[in-house]
Image: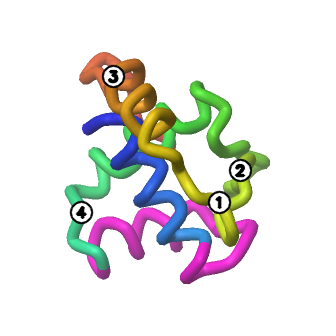
Amino acid sequence: MNGRDLLLILTHLFRKKGNPVCLEDAVEFISFRCRYGKPSQVRRMLTMAVKNEMITRIEELIRADFLFDNQKLSPNLAAELCERLMVSSDINPMF
């Protein structure tokens, strides 16, 4: 998964569910409704988003740190995110 995919998935999540979103609702929505991946993969993805300051986590809520409702990615920014952000397998999922 690259940064562009991560940002698009988070944008879809926050547009559908609002801001903030309960962590369990986010995992359920992305994993089961969108059928993106297993819950453990989704939790790893959310952990990576927190580490890269795309979202913040306050207890069981996650909040977007970007303008998800009107943000448009330029091709240069999307390409840069694609090149620089990779989710590694050594990240532990959120619990």
User: Which residue is label 3 attached to?
Assistant: 83
* Mark 1 residue element: loop
Residue at the spot 65% in from the left edge and 60% down from the top edge? 71
Q: How crowded is the residue under tag 3: few (<14 C-alpha within 10 Å), some, or many (20+)?
A: few
User: Which residue is label 4 attached to?
Assistant: 36
Q: CA distance from mark 4 to mark 2?
A: 21 Å
User: Identity of the amino acid at label 4?
Assistant: Tyr
Which portion, as a residue range, is magenta? Answer: 15-33
Which residue, as the protein is rendered here, is positioned at the far right? 58
Which numbered circle lies on residue 66?
Answer: 2
47 vs 39, left or right, is right
User: Which residue is label 1 attached to?
Assistant: 71
CB contact under 8 Å: marks 3 and 4: no
CB contact under 8 Å: marks 1 and 2: yes
User: Identity of the amino acid at label 1?
Assistant: Gln
* Mark 3 residue element: helix
Q: CA distance from mark 4 to mark 1?
A: 22 Å
Magenta stretch: helix, strand or loop mostly = helix
Q: CA distance from mark 1 to mark 3?
A: 20 Å
Q: How crowded is the residue under tag 1: few (<14 C-alpha within 10 Å), some, or many (20+)?
A: few
CB contact under 8 Å: marks 4 and 1: no
